[in-house]
Image (cartoon, coloured by chain):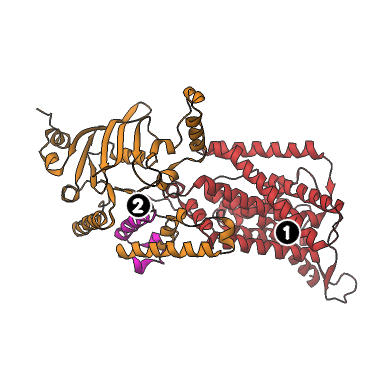
Protein backbone atom coordinates (compact mmCIF):
# COMPACT_ATOMS: atom_id res chain seq x y z
CA UNK A 1 0.00 0.00 0.00
CA UNK A 2 1.30 3.38 -0.98
CA UNK A 3 1.91 5.49 2.12
CA UNK A 4 1.10 8.68 0.17
CA UNK A 5 -2.27 7.46 -1.04
CA UNK A 6 -2.96 6.41 2.52
CA UNK A 7 -2.04 9.88 3.76
CA UNK A 8 -4.09 11.52 1.05
CA UNK A 9 -7.20 9.63 2.18
CA UNK A 10 -6.68 10.96 5.69
CA UNK A 11 -6.63 14.51 4.34
CA UNK A 12 -9.67 14.02 2.11
CA UNK A 13 -11.59 12.28 4.86
CA UNK A 14 -10.86 14.95 7.42
CA UNK A 15 -11.97 17.72 5.06
CA UNK A 16 -15.16 15.92 4.09
CA UNK A 17 -15.81 14.86 7.67
CA UNK A 18 -15.47 18.28 9.20
CA UNK A 19 -18.17 19.63 6.87
CA UNK A 20 -20.42 16.67 7.72
CA UNK A 21 -19.80 17.47 11.35
CA UNK A 22 -20.81 21.11 10.95
CA UNK A 23 -24.12 20.17 9.37
CA UNK A 24 -24.68 17.32 11.82
CA UNK A 25 -24.60 19.87 14.65
CA UNK A 26 -27.90 21.27 13.37
CA UNK A 27 -29.56 17.85 13.45
CA UNK A 28 -28.23 16.90 16.81
CA UNK A 29 -29.13 20.16 18.58
CA UNK A 30 -32.67 20.23 17.23
CA UNK A 31 -33.13 16.57 18.11
CA UNK A 32 -31.78 17.20 21.59
CA UNK A 33 -34.14 20.04 22.31
CA UNK A 34 -37.45 19.04 20.70
CA UNK A 35 -36.85 15.40 19.83
CA UNK A 36 -37.50 15.71 16.12
CA UNK A 37 -35.35 15.17 13.04
CA UNK A 38 -35.33 18.40 11.09
CA UNK A 39 -35.33 17.01 7.57
CA UNK A 40 -35.32 20.52 6.10
CA UNK A 41 -31.82 21.09 7.45
CA UNK A 42 -30.16 19.83 4.25
CA UNK A 43 -32.09 22.44 2.27
CA UNK A 44 -30.83 25.14 4.62
CA UNK A 45 -27.34 24.00 3.70
CA UNK A 46 -28.26 24.11 -0.01
CA UNK A 47 -29.60 27.66 0.33
CA UNK A 48 -26.36 28.75 1.97
CA UNK A 49 -24.47 27.51 -1.11
CA UNK A 50 -26.59 29.77 -3.32
CA UNK A 51 -26.19 32.67 -0.92
CA UNK A 52 -22.41 32.21 -1.02
CA UNK A 53 -22.44 32.46 -4.80
CA UNK A 54 -24.72 35.49 -4.71
CA UNK A 55 -22.54 37.32 -2.20
CA UNK A 56 -19.37 36.44 -4.12
CA UNK A 57 -20.89 37.86 -7.31
CA UNK A 58 -22.17 40.92 -5.46
CA UNK A 59 -18.79 41.71 -3.94
CA UNK A 60 -17.18 41.04 -7.32
CA UNK A 61 -19.34 43.68 -8.98
CA UNK A 62 -18.33 46.15 -6.29
CA UNK A 63 -14.76 45.44 -7.33
CA UNK A 64 -13.49 44.10 -4.04
CA UNK A 65 -10.17 42.37 -4.63
CA UNK A 66 -8.74 41.45 -1.24
CA UNK A 67 -9.43 37.73 -0.73
CA UNK A 68 -9.55 37.70 3.09
CA UNK A 69 -11.97 40.65 3.19
CA UNK A 70 -14.19 39.03 0.56
CA UNK A 71 -14.22 35.74 2.46
CA UNK A 72 -15.10 37.35 5.78
CA UNK A 73 -17.89 39.43 4.21
CA UNK A 74 -19.29 36.45 2.33
CA UNK A 75 -19.16 34.36 5.49
CA UNK A 76 -20.98 37.03 7.53
CA UNK A 77 -23.64 37.61 4.88
CA UNK A 78 -24.24 33.92 4.27
CA UNK A 79 -24.42 33.04 7.95
CA UNK A 80 -26.81 35.88 8.75
CA UNK A 81 -29.21 35.21 5.90
CA UNK A 82 -29.12 31.43 6.33
CA UNK A 83 -29.81 31.87 10.03
CA UNK A 84 -32.85 33.93 9.05
CA UNK A 85 -34.02 31.02 6.89
CA UNK A 86 -33.52 28.63 9.78
CA UNK A 87 -35.48 30.89 12.11
CA UNK A 88 -38.34 31.28 9.62
CA UNK A 89 -38.60 27.54 8.99
CA UNK A 90 -39.00 26.91 12.71
CA UNK A 91 -41.48 29.74 13.13
CA UNK A 92 -43.65 28.77 10.18
CA UNK A 93 -43.43 25.00 9.98
CA UNK A 94 -42.68 23.69 13.47
CA UNK A 95 -43.85 26.05 16.18
CA UNK A 96 -47.57 25.81 15.31
CA UNK A 97 -47.22 22.02 15.67
CA UNK A 98 -45.28 22.19 18.94
CA UNK A 99 -47.91 20.43 21.04
CA UNK A 100 -49.28 18.00 18.51
CA UNK A 101 -48.01 14.43 18.14
CA UNK A 102 -44.45 13.68 17.08
CA UNK A 103 -45.29 12.72 13.51
CA UNK A 104 -46.82 16.07 12.55
CA UNK A 105 -43.63 18.19 12.63
CA UNK A 106 -41.75 15.41 10.83
CA UNK A 107 -44.16 15.54 7.91
CA UNK A 108 -44.10 19.31 8.04
CA UNK A 109 -40.29 19.10 7.77
CA UNK A 110 -40.49 17.00 4.63
CA UNK A 111 -43.00 19.48 3.24
CA UNK A 112 -40.86 22.50 3.94
CA UNK A 113 -37.88 20.72 2.44
CA UNK A 114 -39.79 20.20 -0.83
CA UNK A 115 -40.94 23.81 -0.76
CA UNK A 116 -37.40 25.13 -0.31
CA UNK A 117 -36.03 22.90 -3.08
CA UNK A 118 -38.63 24.02 -5.55
CA UNK A 119 -38.40 27.63 -4.49
CA UNK A 120 -34.70 27.55 -5.36
CA UNK A 121 -35.32 25.57 -8.55
CA UNK A 122 -37.83 28.14 -9.75
CA UNK A 123 -36.00 31.25 -8.62
CA UNK A 124 -32.46 30.17 -9.52
CA UNK A 125 -33.03 27.64 -12.28
CA UNK A 126 -32.44 23.91 -12.30
CA UNK A 127 -29.05 24.09 -14.00
CA UNK A 128 -25.81 23.45 -12.19
CA UNK A 129 -24.36 26.67 -10.82
CA UNK A 130 -20.76 27.44 -10.09
CA UNK A 131 -18.40 29.84 -8.39
CA UNK A 132 -14.87 30.64 -9.58
CA UNK A 133 -12.03 29.41 -7.37
CA UNK A 134 -11.23 32.12 -4.83
CA UNK A 135 -8.27 30.54 -3.10
CA UNK A 136 -5.76 28.40 -4.90
CA UNK A 137 -2.41 27.11 -3.86
CA UNK A 138 -1.38 23.77 -2.46
CA UNK A 139 1.06 22.32 -0.03
CA UNK A 140 2.79 19.12 -0.99
CA UNK A 141 4.41 16.75 1.42
CA UNK A 142 7.25 16.14 0.73
CA UNK A 143 7.68 19.47 -1.04
CA UNK A 144 10.09 18.30 -3.72
CA UNK A 145 8.21 15.14 -4.69
CA UNK A 146 8.15 13.70 -8.20
CA UNK A 147 5.43 11.62 -9.91
CA UNK A 148 2.51 10.75 -7.64
CA UNK A 149 4.51 10.31 -4.51
CA UNK A 150 3.18 13.09 -2.34
CA UNK A 151 0.25 14.09 -0.14
CA UNK A 152 -1.49 17.20 -1.38
CA UNK A 153 -3.31 19.67 0.85
CA UNK A 154 -4.87 22.69 -0.80
CA UNK A 155 -4.94 25.93 1.15
CA UNK A 156 -8.71 25.83 0.97
CA UNK A 157 -8.82 22.34 2.50
CA UNK A 158 -6.80 23.48 5.47
CA UNK A 159 -9.05 26.53 5.78
CA UNK A 160 -12.09 24.21 5.83
CA UNK A 161 -10.73 22.07 8.63
CA UNK A 162 -9.59 25.04 10.70
CA UNK A 163 -12.85 26.96 10.24
CA UNK A 164 -14.95 23.90 10.99
CA UNK A 165 -13.17 23.13 14.22
CA UNK A 166 -13.08 26.81 15.22
CA UNK A 167 -16.84 27.19 14.73
CA UNK A 168 -17.41 24.03 16.72
CA UNK A 169 -15.23 25.38 19.51
CA UNK A 170 -17.17 28.66 19.57
CA UNK A 171 -20.48 26.83 19.62
CA UNK A 172 -19.42 24.50 22.42
CA UNK A 173 -18.19 27.48 24.37
CA UNK A 174 -21.52 29.28 23.94
CA UNK A 175 -23.41 26.23 25.15
CA UNK A 176 -21.25 25.79 28.22
CA UNK A 177 -20.32 29.30 29.31
CA UNK A 178 -23.17 31.69 28.58
CA UNK A 179 -26.55 32.19 30.20
CA UNK A 180 -28.14 31.44 26.85
CA UNK A 181 -26.31 28.13 26.56
CA UNK A 182 -27.27 27.20 30.11
CA UNK A 183 -30.90 27.81 29.27
CA UNK A 184 -30.45 25.65 26.15
CA UNK A 185 -29.11 22.76 28.21
CA UNK A 186 -31.92 23.11 30.75
CA UNK A 187 -34.54 23.26 28.00
CA UNK A 188 -33.03 20.17 26.43
CA UNK A 189 -33.48 18.22 29.66
CA UNK A 190 -36.96 19.34 30.64
CA UNK A 191 -38.68 21.89 28.45
CA UNK A 192 -41.77 22.25 30.62
CA UNK A 193 -39.79 22.76 33.80
CA UNK A 194 -37.52 25.34 32.18
CA UNK A 195 -40.63 27.18 31.01
CA UNK A 196 -42.08 27.14 34.53
CA UNK A 197 -38.82 28.61 35.83
CA UNK A 198 -39.24 31.65 33.62
CA UNK A 199 -37.20 30.61 30.59
CA UNK A 200 -38.93 31.55 27.34
CA UNK A 201 -38.47 28.13 25.77
CA UNK A 202 -39.90 29.17 22.40
CA UNK A 203 -37.10 31.70 22.13
CA UNK A 204 -34.52 29.09 23.13
CA UNK A 205 -35.81 26.73 20.45
CA UNK A 206 -35.55 29.54 17.88
CA UNK A 207 -31.99 30.17 18.98
CA UNK A 208 -31.14 26.50 18.52
CA UNK A 209 -32.50 26.56 14.98
CA UNK A 210 -30.57 29.74 14.26
CA UNK A 211 -27.32 28.27 15.59
CA UNK A 212 -27.82 25.06 13.61
CA UNK A 213 -28.49 27.03 10.44
CA UNK A 214 -25.43 29.21 11.04
CA UNK A 215 -23.23 26.10 11.29
CA UNK A 216 -24.78 24.70 8.10
CA UNK A 217 -24.06 28.05 6.44
CA UNK A 218 -20.38 27.85 7.37
CA UNK A 219 -20.28 24.34 5.88
CA UNK A 220 -22.22 25.44 2.79
CA UNK A 221 -19.85 28.28 2.08
CA UNK A 222 -16.71 26.19 2.56
CA UNK A 223 -17.94 23.28 0.45
CA UNK A 224 -19.11 25.62 -2.30
CA UNK A 225 -15.72 27.31 -2.43
CA UNK A 226 -14.05 23.90 -2.48
CA UNK A 227 -16.09 22.12 -5.18
CA UNK A 228 -17.20 25.21 -7.07
CA UNK A 229 -20.43 23.66 -8.30
CA UNK A 230 -23.86 23.06 -6.82
CA UNK A 231 -27.53 22.76 -7.73
CA UNK A 232 -30.89 22.88 -5.99
CA UNK A 233 -30.73 19.19 -5.08
CA UNK A 234 -27.42 19.00 -3.16
CA UNK A 235 -29.18 19.45 0.18
CA UNK A 236 -30.75 16.01 0.09
CA UNK A 237 -27.63 13.85 -0.03
CA UNK A 238 -25.61 16.17 2.21
CA UNK A 239 -28.47 16.30 4.70
CA UNK A 240 -28.80 12.52 4.87
CA UNK A 241 -25.04 12.13 5.22
CA UNK A 242 -24.91 14.65 8.04
CA UNK A 243 -27.84 12.91 9.69
CA UNK A 244 -25.83 9.68 9.47
CA UNK A 245 -22.93 11.48 11.09
CA UNK A 246 -25.18 12.70 13.90
CA UNK A 247 -26.43 9.15 14.54
CA UNK A 248 -22.90 7.75 14.43
CA UNK A 249 -21.73 10.24 17.01
CA UNK A 250 -24.78 9.77 19.20
CA UNK A 251 -27.71 12.00 18.34
CA UNK A 252 -28.18 14.74 20.89
CA UNK A 253 -24.47 15.05 21.65
CA UNK A 254 -22.57 18.07 20.34
CA UNK A 255 -19.01 16.67 20.34
CA UNK A 256 -20.56 13.44 19.08
CA UNK A 257 -21.78 15.22 15.94
CA UNK A 258 -18.29 16.42 15.10
CA UNK A 259 -16.73 13.03 15.90
CA UNK A 260 -19.40 11.22 13.89
CA UNK A 261 -18.79 13.59 10.98
CA UNK A 262 -15.06 13.01 10.96
CA UNK A 263 -15.45 9.23 11.30
CA UNK A 264 -17.98 9.11 8.48
CA UNK A 265 -15.81 11.32 6.27
CA UNK A 266 -12.76 9.16 6.88
CA UNK A 267 -14.67 5.92 6.38
CA UNK A 268 -16.10 7.20 3.13
CA UNK A 269 -12.83 8.45 1.73
CA UNK A 270 -10.92 5.28 2.68
CA UNK A 271 -13.62 3.14 1.10
CA UNK A 272 -13.51 5.30 -2.03
CA UNK A 273 -9.72 5.25 -2.13
CA UNK A 274 -9.10 1.57 -1.48
CA UNK A 275 -12.27 -0.33 -2.35
CA UNK A 276 -14.62 1.30 -4.78
CA UNK A 277 -15.49 4.95 -5.22
CA UNK A 278 -18.85 4.24 -6.88
CA UNK A 279 -20.19 2.56 -3.78
CA UNK A 280 -19.01 5.04 -1.16
CA UNK A 281 -22.58 6.25 -0.45
CA UNK A 282 -23.75 2.67 -0.09
CA UNK A 283 -20.95 2.12 2.40
CA UNK A 284 -21.87 5.26 4.36
CA UNK A 285 -25.51 4.25 4.68
CA UNK A 286 -24.56 0.65 5.53
CA UNK A 287 -22.67 2.15 8.44
CA UNK A 288 -25.85 4.00 9.45
CA UNK A 289 -27.82 0.73 9.38
CA UNK A 290 -25.16 -1.15 11.33
CA UNK A 291 -25.10 1.54 13.98
CA UNK A 292 -28.87 1.67 14.24
CA UNK A 293 -28.90 -2.09 14.82
CA UNK A 294 -25.91 -2.59 17.10
CA UNK A 295 -25.27 0.74 18.77
CA UNK A 296 -28.23 3.08 18.35
CA UNK A 297 -26.83 5.48 20.93
CA UNK A 298 -23.73 6.11 18.79
CA UNK A 299 -20.23 6.81 20.04
CA UNK A 300 -21.01 9.44 22.66
CA UNK A 301 -24.75 9.20 23.16
CA UNK A 302 -26.07 7.94 26.45
CA UNK A 303 -28.49 5.04 26.01
CA UNK A 304 -31.93 5.96 27.20
CA UNK A 305 -32.81 4.04 30.32
CA UNK A 306 -36.49 3.42 30.81
CA UNK A 307 -37.32 4.03 34.43
CA UNK A 308 -39.66 1.49 35.93
CA UNK B 1 -53.22 41.58 55.60
CA UNK B 2 -54.13 41.85 51.96
CA UNK B 3 -54.83 39.20 49.39
CA UNK B 4 -51.94 38.16 47.16
CA UNK B 5 -53.74 35.61 45.04
CA UNK B 6 -57.43 35.54 44.20
CA UNK B 7 -58.88 32.55 42.39
CA UNK B 8 -62.47 32.97 41.26
CA UNK B 9 -64.88 30.58 39.59
CA UNK B 10 -62.07 28.41 38.32
CA UNK B 11 -63.44 25.59 36.14
CA UNK B 12 -61.45 23.18 34.03
CA UNK B 13 -62.68 20.20 32.05
CA UNK B 14 -60.74 17.41 30.46
CA UNK B 15 -63.06 15.97 27.83
CA UNK B 16 -66.20 15.07 29.75
CA UNK B 17 -64.60 15.16 33.18
CA UNK B 18 -64.94 18.35 35.17
CA UNK B 19 -61.76 18.38 37.21
CA UNK B 20 -62.47 21.68 38.95
CA UNK B 21 -65.89 23.19 39.47
CA UNK B 22 -66.05 26.92 40.30
CA UNK B 23 -63.17 26.90 42.72
CA UNK B 24 -62.88 30.10 44.78
CA UNK B 25 -60.24 30.97 47.30
CA UNK B 26 -57.78 33.68 48.25
CA UNK B 27 -54.26 33.52 49.57
CA UNK B 28 -53.34 36.32 51.99
CA UNK B 29 -49.96 37.94 51.54
CA UNK B 30 -47.43 36.58 54.02
CA UNK B 31 -49.53 33.56 54.96
CA UNK B 32 -49.15 29.82 54.63
CA UNK B 33 -52.23 28.49 52.91
CA UNK B 34 -52.68 24.75 52.58
CA UNK B 35 -54.78 22.99 49.99
CA UNK B 36 -55.97 19.64 51.29
CA UNK B 37 -58.42 16.97 50.27
CA UNK B 38 -58.64 13.28 49.48
CA UNK B 39 -56.79 11.80 46.52
CA UNK B 40 -58.16 12.94 43.18
CA UNK B 41 -59.84 15.99 44.70
CA UNK B 42 -58.13 18.33 42.22
CA UNK B 43 -55.44 19.88 44.39
CA UNK B 44 -52.66 19.46 41.87
CA UNK B 45 -54.97 20.67 39.10
CA UNK B 46 -55.44 23.92 41.01
CA UNK B 47 -51.67 24.21 41.23
CA UNK B 48 -51.28 23.56 37.55
CA UNK B 49 -53.75 26.32 36.74
CA UNK B 50 -52.17 28.82 39.12
CA UNK B 51 -48.65 28.22 37.79
CA UNK B 52 -49.67 28.32 34.15
CA UNK B 53 -49.14 24.63 33.45
CA UNK B 54 -52.82 24.23 32.47
CA UNK B 55 -55.16 26.76 30.98
CA UNK B 56 -58.52 26.80 32.79
CA UNK B 57 -61.76 26.90 30.81
CA UNK B 58 -63.38 29.69 32.79
CA UNK B 59 -62.74 31.76 35.87
CA UNK B 60 -59.98 34.13 36.77
CA UNK B 61 -56.70 34.01 38.64
CA UNK B 62 -55.25 37.31 39.83
CA UNK B 63 -51.91 37.92 41.44
CA UNK B 64 -52.05 41.28 43.23
CA UNK B 65 -49.30 43.82 43.77
CA UNK B 66 -45.85 43.65 42.26
CA UNK B 67 -44.10 45.93 39.82
CA UNK B 68 -47.04 46.35 37.43
CA UNK B 69 -49.72 46.52 40.12
CA UNK B 70 -51.20 43.07 39.64
CA UNK B 71 -51.54 40.56 36.86
CA UNK B 72 -54.24 38.40 35.41
CA UNK B 73 -52.42 35.10 35.20
CA UNK B 74 -54.85 33.60 32.71
CA UNK B 75 -54.29 36.48 30.29
CA UNK B 76 -50.53 35.93 30.47
CA UNK B 77 -50.99 32.45 29.03
CA UNK B 78 -52.65 33.84 25.93
CA UNK B 79 -56.45 33.83 25.76
CA UNK B 80 -58.38 32.99 22.64
CA UNK B 81 -59.57 35.94 20.57
CA UNK B 82 -63.23 36.90 20.53
CA UNK B 83 -65.37 38.90 18.13
CA UNK B 84 -65.91 41.59 20.74
CA UNK B 85 -62.16 42.28 20.60
CA UNK B 86 -62.67 43.88 17.20
CA UNK B 87 -64.02 47.12 18.69
CA UNK B 88 -61.70 47.02 21.69
CA UNK B 89 -58.35 47.48 20.00
CA UNK B 90 -56.46 47.75 23.27
CA UNK B 91 -57.68 44.37 24.47
CA UNK B 92 -57.13 42.90 21.02
CA UNK B 93 -53.55 44.16 21.09
CA UNK B 94 -52.83 42.72 24.51
CA UNK B 95 -54.40 39.38 23.58
CA UNK B 96 -52.38 39.17 20.38
CA UNK B 97 -49.23 40.08 22.30
CA UNK B 98 -49.81 37.40 24.91
CA UNK B 99 -50.73 34.86 22.26
CA UNK B 100 -47.35 35.43 20.63
CA UNK B 101 -45.12 35.92 23.65
CA UNK B 102 -47.19 34.53 26.52
CA UNK B 103 -46.79 31.24 28.31
CA UNK B 104 -45.89 29.76 31.67
CA UNK B 105 -42.61 31.69 31.72
CA UNK B 106 -44.58 34.94 31.97
CA UNK B 107 -46.46 33.60 35.00
CA UNK B 108 -43.12 32.85 36.62
CA UNK B 109 -41.81 36.28 35.74
CA UNK B 110 -44.64 38.03 37.58
CA UNK B 111 -43.81 36.03 40.69
CA UNK B 112 -45.20 32.50 40.91
CA UNK B 113 -42.83 29.57 41.39
CA UNK B 114 -43.55 25.95 42.13
CA UNK B 115 -42.12 22.58 43.00
CA UNK B 116 -43.40 19.22 41.85
CA UNK B 117 -44.70 16.21 43.74
CA UNK B 118 -42.33 14.00 41.74
CA UNK B 119 -39.11 15.99 41.71
CA UNK B 120 -38.23 17.60 38.37
CA UNK B 121 -34.63 18.75 38.56
CA UNK B 122 -32.27 19.15 35.62
CA UNK B 123 -30.43 15.97 36.52
CA UNK B 124 -27.49 16.40 34.15
CA UNK B 125 -26.75 19.95 35.33
CA UNK B 126 -24.89 20.70 38.54
CA UNK B 127 -26.70 21.91 41.63
CA UNK B 128 -25.39 25.43 41.03
CA UNK B 129 -26.41 25.41 37.36
CA UNK B 130 -29.92 24.37 38.34
CA UNK B 131 -30.14 27.50 40.47
CA UNK B 132 -28.61 29.70 37.76
CA UNK B 133 -31.12 28.55 35.15
CA UNK B 134 -33.84 29.67 37.54
CA UNK B 135 -32.32 33.17 37.44
CA UNK B 136 -32.42 33.31 33.66
CA UNK B 137 -34.43 36.54 33.73
CA UNK B 138 -32.04 38.26 36.10
CA UNK B 139 -29.02 37.62 33.90
CA UNK B 140 -28.40 39.16 30.51
CA UNK B 141 -29.02 36.20 28.23
CA UNK B 142 -28.04 37.87 24.96
CA UNK B 143 -25.77 35.85 22.72
CA UNK B 144 -23.29 38.63 22.14
CA UNK B 145 -22.86 39.76 25.74
CA UNK B 146 -22.34 36.14 26.75
CA UNK B 147 -19.90 35.53 23.93
CA UNK B 148 -17.67 38.48 24.73
CA UNK B 149 -18.33 38.10 28.49
CA UNK B 150 -19.28 41.75 28.78
CA UNK B 151 -18.80 43.51 32.08
CA UNK B 152 -22.58 43.69 32.59
CA UNK B 153 -22.91 39.95 31.96
CA UNK B 154 -20.16 39.09 34.42
CA UNK B 155 -21.58 41.39 37.11
CA UNK B 156 -25.06 39.90 36.77
CA UNK B 157 -23.65 36.38 36.69
CA UNK B 158 -21.74 37.14 39.89
CA UNK B 159 -24.88 38.45 41.57
CA UNK B 160 -26.78 35.35 40.47
CA UNK B 161 -24.06 33.12 41.91
CA UNK B 162 -24.28 34.96 45.21
CA UNK B 163 -28.06 34.66 45.41
CA UNK B 164 -27.79 30.97 44.59
CA UNK B 165 -25.12 30.45 47.26
CA UNK B 166 -27.28 32.22 49.83
CA UNK B 167 -30.18 29.85 49.19
CA UNK B 168 -27.86 26.85 49.13
CA UNK B 169 -26.58 27.89 52.55
CA UNK B 170 -30.13 28.32 53.81
CA UNK B 171 -31.04 24.79 52.67
CA UNK B 172 -27.72 23.41 53.88
CA UNK B 173 -26.67 22.30 50.39
CA UNK B 174 -23.59 24.47 49.88
CA UNK B 175 -21.10 21.56 49.99
CA UNK B 176 -22.99 19.92 47.13
CA UNK B 177 -22.92 22.96 44.82
CA UNK B 178 -20.77 21.33 42.14
CA UNK B 179 -22.32 17.86 42.16
CA UNK B 180 -24.78 16.80 39.50
CA UNK B 181 -28.33 17.30 40.71
CA UNK B 182 -29.23 13.76 39.65
CA UNK B 183 -26.77 12.14 42.02
CA UNK B 184 -27.99 13.86 45.19
CA UNK B 185 -29.88 11.80 47.77
CA UNK B 186 -33.66 12.13 47.70
CA UNK B 187 -34.06 14.49 50.64
CA UNK B 188 -31.45 16.85 49.24
CA UNK B 189 -33.16 16.85 45.85
CA UNK B 190 -36.38 17.96 47.53
CA UNK B 191 -34.62 20.88 49.20
CA UNK B 192 -32.78 21.75 46.00
CA UNK B 193 -36.07 21.97 44.17
CA UNK B 194 -37.33 24.44 46.76
CA UNK B 195 -34.11 26.44 46.52
CA UNK B 196 -34.46 26.54 42.75
CA UNK B 197 -38.05 27.78 42.94
CA UNK B 198 -36.92 30.50 45.39
CA UNK B 199 -34.14 31.59 43.03
CA UNK B 200 -36.73 32.84 40.55
CA UNK B 201 -37.52 35.46 43.25
CA UNK B 202 -41.21 34.58 43.54
CA UNK B 203 -43.85 36.37 45.56
CA UNK B 204 -45.94 33.21 45.76
CA UNK B 205 -44.25 29.87 46.33
CA UNK B 206 -46.33 26.81 45.50
CA UNK B 207 -45.13 23.58 47.12
CA UNK B 208 -46.69 20.34 45.87
CA UNK B 209 -46.38 17.73 48.65
CA UNK B 210 -42.95 18.84 49.88
CA UNK B 211 -42.97 16.24 52.65
CA UNK B 212 -43.72 13.24 50.40
CA UNK B 213 -41.14 10.52 51.02
CA UNK B 214 -39.54 12.22 54.03
CA UNK B 215 -39.27 10.56 57.43
CA UNK B 216 -40.93 12.15 60.49
CA UNK B 217 -37.77 13.99 61.55
CA UNK B 218 -37.17 15.39 58.08
CA UNK B 219 -40.82 16.41 57.88
CA UNK B 220 -40.50 18.33 61.14
CA UNK B 221 -37.37 20.09 59.88
CA UNK B 222 -39.16 20.94 56.63
CA UNK B 223 -42.07 22.44 58.56
CA UNK B 224 -39.66 24.69 60.46
CA UNK B 225 -37.99 25.65 57.19
CA UNK B 226 -41.31 26.68 55.65
CA UNK B 227 -42.16 28.74 58.72
CA UNK B 228 -38.77 30.45 58.46
CA UNK B 229 -39.45 31.27 54.83
CA UNK B 230 -42.66 33.01 55.86
CA UNK B 231 -41.30 34.81 58.89
CA UNK B 232 -37.83 35.79 57.77
CA UNK B 233 -38.28 36.21 54.02
CA UNK B 234 -41.94 37.38 53.96
CA UNK B 235 -42.73 34.61 51.54
CA UNK B 236 -46.33 33.70 50.80
CA UNK B 237 -46.74 29.95 50.51
CA UNK B 238 -49.42 27.82 48.94
CA UNK B 239 -49.03 24.22 49.97
CA UNK B 240 -50.45 20.82 49.07
CA UNK B 241 -49.74 18.27 51.74
CA UNK B 242 -51.04 14.95 53.00
CA UNK B 243 -49.16 15.00 56.27
CA UNK B 244 -51.96 16.41 58.46
CA UNK B 245 -49.67 16.84 61.45
CA UNK B 246 -47.50 19.26 59.54
CA UNK B 247 -50.39 20.98 57.78
CA UNK B 248 -52.27 21.69 61.00
CA UNK B 249 -49.11 22.87 62.71
CA UNK B 250 -47.83 25.37 60.17
CA UNK B 251 -50.74 26.66 58.08
CA UNK B 252 -52.60 29.87 58.74
CA UNK B 253 -55.45 29.05 56.42
CA UNK B 254 -56.82 25.86 54.88
CA UNK B 255 -58.82 25.22 51.74
CA UNK B 256 -60.42 21.78 51.48
CA UNK B 257 -61.24 20.35 48.07
CA UNK B 258 -63.32 17.31 47.25
CA UNK B 259 -64.36 16.15 43.79
CA UNK B 260 -63.14 19.42 42.29
CA UNK B 261 -65.14 21.67 44.59
CA UNK B 262 -64.19 23.70 47.62
CA UNK B 263 -66.06 22.18 50.57
CA UNK B 264 -64.54 24.23 53.38
CA UNK B 265 -62.14 27.05 54.17
CA UNK B 266 -60.86 28.33 57.47
CA UNK B 267 -58.26 28.09 60.18
CA UNK B 268 -56.93 24.66 61.17
CA UNK B 269 -59.19 24.60 64.24
CA UNK B 270 -62.30 25.33 62.21
CA UNK B 271 -61.43 22.71 59.62
CA UNK B 272 -60.86 20.02 62.24
CA UNK B 273 -64.40 20.52 63.49
CA UNK B 274 -66.02 20.72 60.05
CA UNK B 275 -68.49 17.90 59.39
CA UNK B 276 -68.21 18.00 55.61
CA UNK B 277 -64.44 17.66 55.80
CA UNK B 278 -64.73 14.69 58.13
CA UNK B 279 -67.25 13.15 55.76
CA UNK B 280 -64.99 13.66 52.76
CA UNK B 281 -62.07 12.03 54.51
CA UNK B 282 -63.88 9.27 56.35
CA UNK B 283 -66.49 8.58 53.70
CA UNK B 284 -69.68 8.87 55.76
CA UNK B 285 -72.67 10.89 54.60
CA UNK B 286 -73.01 14.31 56.23
CA UNK B 287 -75.94 14.38 58.59
Q: Is residue A308 left or right of residue A212?
A: left
Judged from the image, the secondary structure of the residue bearing numbered disc 1 is helix
Q: Height in image: B219 above or below B110?
A: below
Residue positioned 77% across, 58% down in the render: A272
Visible residue check, residue B123: yes
- The percent coordinates of residue B214 (x first, y second) are 24, 55
Residue positioned 32% across, 38% down in the render: B45
Q: Which chain is red?
A: A
Residue positioned 20% across, 43% down in the render: B253
Q: Is residue B184 left or right of residue A23?
A: left
Judged from the image, the secondary structure of the residue bearing numbered disc 2 is loop
Let me know if residue A22 is in the magenta part: no
- The percent coordinates of residue A210 (x first, y second) are 62, 49
Query: What is chain B's hue in the picture?
Result: orange
Which residue is situated farthest in the right direction here?
Answer: A147
Tags 1 and 2 touching, CB below 8 Å: no
Residue tagged by mark 2?
B119
Q: Check the residue under mark 2 and report the chain it is in.
A: B
Residue tagged by mark 1?
A16
Quadrant for residue B1, please give it: top left
- The percent coordinates of residue A98 (x first, y second) are 52, 39
- Span shown in magenta: B173-200
Let me know if residue B188 is in the magenta part: yes
- Name the mark nearer the viewer: 1 or 2: 2
Q: Check the residue under mark 1 and report the chain it is in.
A: A
Q: Nearer the viewer, residue B254 or A26?
A: B254
Gap between marks 1 and 2 measured at Cα: 45 Å
- The percent coordinates of residue A66 (x first, y second) are 83, 62
User: How many numbered marks are there?
Assistant: 2
Quadrant for residue A268, please give it: bottom right
Image quadrant containing the N terminus of chain A: bottom right
Amino acid sequence: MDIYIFGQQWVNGLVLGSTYGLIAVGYTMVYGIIGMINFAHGEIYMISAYLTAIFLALLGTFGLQSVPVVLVLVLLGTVLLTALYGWSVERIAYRPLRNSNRLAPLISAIGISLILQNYIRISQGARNQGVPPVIDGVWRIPANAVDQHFVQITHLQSLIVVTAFASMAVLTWIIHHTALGRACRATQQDRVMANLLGVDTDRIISVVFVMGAAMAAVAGMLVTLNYGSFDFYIGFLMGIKAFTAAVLGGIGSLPGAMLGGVVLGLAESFFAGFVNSDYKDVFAFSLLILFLIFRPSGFLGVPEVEKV
Amino acid sequence: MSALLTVQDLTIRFGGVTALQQVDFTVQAGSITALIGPNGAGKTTVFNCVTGFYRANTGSIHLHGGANGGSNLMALLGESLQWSDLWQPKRLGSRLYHKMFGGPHRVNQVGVARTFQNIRLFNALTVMENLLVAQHNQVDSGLLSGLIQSRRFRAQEQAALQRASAWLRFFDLLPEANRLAGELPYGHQRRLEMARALCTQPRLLCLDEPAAGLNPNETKALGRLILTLRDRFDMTILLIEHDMGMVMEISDHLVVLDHGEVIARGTPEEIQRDDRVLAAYLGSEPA
